[in-house]
Every structure is written in C-alpha cells, then in structure tokens.
Amino acid sequence: MFRRRLKALDFEDWDKFNGNDSGEVRHLVLWLEDQKIRYHKPEGRTALREIESNNWPKAFDEYCKELGCPVKTSLLDKVEWLVGQAIRYEYEDNQKVCQDILSNKLNKKTEIIAPTVKSTNPLDSLDFDSKEFKEGVSALAKLLDIQEHPDHLITLEACSKLVSKKLSPSIVKNPNAFIPEGKAFPILEQKIGPDMKDPVLNKASRILQLLYIQDLRELQTKINESIVSVQSITANPKTDTKLGKVGF
C-alpha cells in the first residue's frame, strides 16, 4: 500500500523504496516537501536538505509539528502520514481532472455493465417507504400479534419469519401434527444464568439464552442435513466393472 501511494505520486523508484533505509526515508521527506506539499518556500527547506546532518531528525520533528502531524510513533509512521497529505494536496491541485476521469470511468462502466432489464415481479414496483405500505405492515403485525418495531421493515421481517415457520402449507394442511401438546414449561420462571438482581434484566437474559440455544439447534440441524447428504453419495458409489474399480 505504501509503495502504491508513492507510485500514485510519481515518485522515482517507488517499487524499490526501502523504509528501513534512513537515507531513502530522508530523501523521500525532502522530495515530498519540494514536489508535493510545499509548505515552506525553497529557502525554508535548508534543514531538510541536510540529509546527512545529525540535526535532521530534530528538523523533521519540527517540520511535522508545523504541519500539524498527529502521529507520535515511529519515523516511518510519520512519513506515511506525510505521503497521505501529499496525495490530498495532489488531488486538490488536480481535482477537476480527477473528477472528470472518475466520471468518464463510471459512465463507461454503467454503459457496459448495466443492461436494461424490465422486471415482471410486482414486488419490484412497490414503494417500501410509502404510507400505505407502512400501514399494511402495521395491520399485518397486529393480525399476527407481533410487537411493532420503529423500523417497519424489521417488523415485516418478523412477520415473514412467523409465517414461514408457523403458517407454512404443510402446517396449515395438518395443524394438529405441529401444535405442541401438554402444558408449556415455564422457562422464564426458571433460574438460568447469573442473577442480575433485576427481574426485567433476568427475563431479558433468559430470552437471549433461549434465542442462542435456538440458533445452535438450527445450526446443528443444518450440519446433520449436510452429513446425511454427503453420506447418501459416498455410501452408494457407482461401480464400473469394465474398469475393475469402484468410484465415479
């Protein structure tokens, strides 16, 4: 990423830059100030030009302080921040050119990738934020005895889950086979997990635990179904007697 930024700035030998070489790092700092950042006038860059001087680190720290650099860690981290600043200045200097190039690319991409498709699905023509749609979701939630959420789309998702799990064609056709029999177990009255010293928090904690257990159960069911599917293939391989071997 660091080298790609240098390439974007047209830095010479960007692909060979060695951040562990202090000489190359100091040369880069001077190049950024001379060519891209230009915070000081040429005569004010004397301290940065003295790359071999022992006073260069102090001059660099002062330079970073003048630019408002928030980085306080390593030298290379500060240089990386300077590179980011240089890219920002480069963009500001050539903002219109960059925007024109980006606009042209987006237009070409739209022309190539976005074909004209006429949908036949009536749901695609619905306005999901219209007043009528929201009222319909609210009426459906009341019919299914579902508590409404401030976001009507989340309420609709809850309705969808209830319908798919409790009102599927197989359940509607033979509801007695799916309706639990016997007395419901008072799970919310049981002591599960730590005591929050608050009945409301305890109830919320039990509900979250039940939802977590349900997710685990669904995951285990899917795992079992996957195992059965694989076993149905591996346990009944096709035999080619001509080849004298068993397999596909």
Image: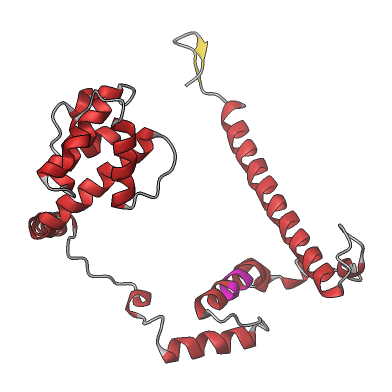
Q: Identify the main secondary structure in magenta.
A: helix
Relative height, residue 184 to residue 46 (above, below) = below
Placement of the N terminus among the 4 image quadrants: top left
Using the rendered image of the protein, determine whether residue 8 is visible from the camera's viewpoint.
no
Start and end of the magenta stretch?
Answer: 158-162
Q: Residue at x 54, y 74 (%)?
A: 154
Frontmost residue, 76 versus 189: 76
Q: Picture quarter containing residue 52?
A: top left
Across and down, in percent, residue 110 comes to 16, 59
Q: Residue at x 55, y 72 (%)?
A: 157
Q: Residue at x 16, y 53 (%)?
A: 91
Q: Picture quarter containing residue 61?
A: top left
Relative height, residue 129 to residue 29 (above, below) = below
Using the rendered image of the protein, determine whether residue 233 is visible from the camera's viewpoint.
yes
Q: Is residue 137 left or right of residue 95?
A: right
Relative height, residue 38 to residue 21 (above, below) = below
Across and down, in percent, residue 30 comes to 19, 35
Q: Picture quarter containing residue 62?
A: top left
* Residue 25 highlighted magenta (yes or no): no
Across and down, in percent, residue 147 comes to 66, 82
Frontmost residue, 21 versus 94: 21
Q: Residue at x 56, y 87 (%)?
A: 138
Q: Is residue 236 left or right of residue 4?
A: right
Across and down, in percent, residue 215 comes to 68, 55
Q: Is residue 16 left or right of residue 65?
A: left
Relative height, residue 97 to residue 83 (above, below) = below
* Residue 159 highlighted magenta (yes or no): yes
Q: Is residue 60 left or right of residue 164?
A: left
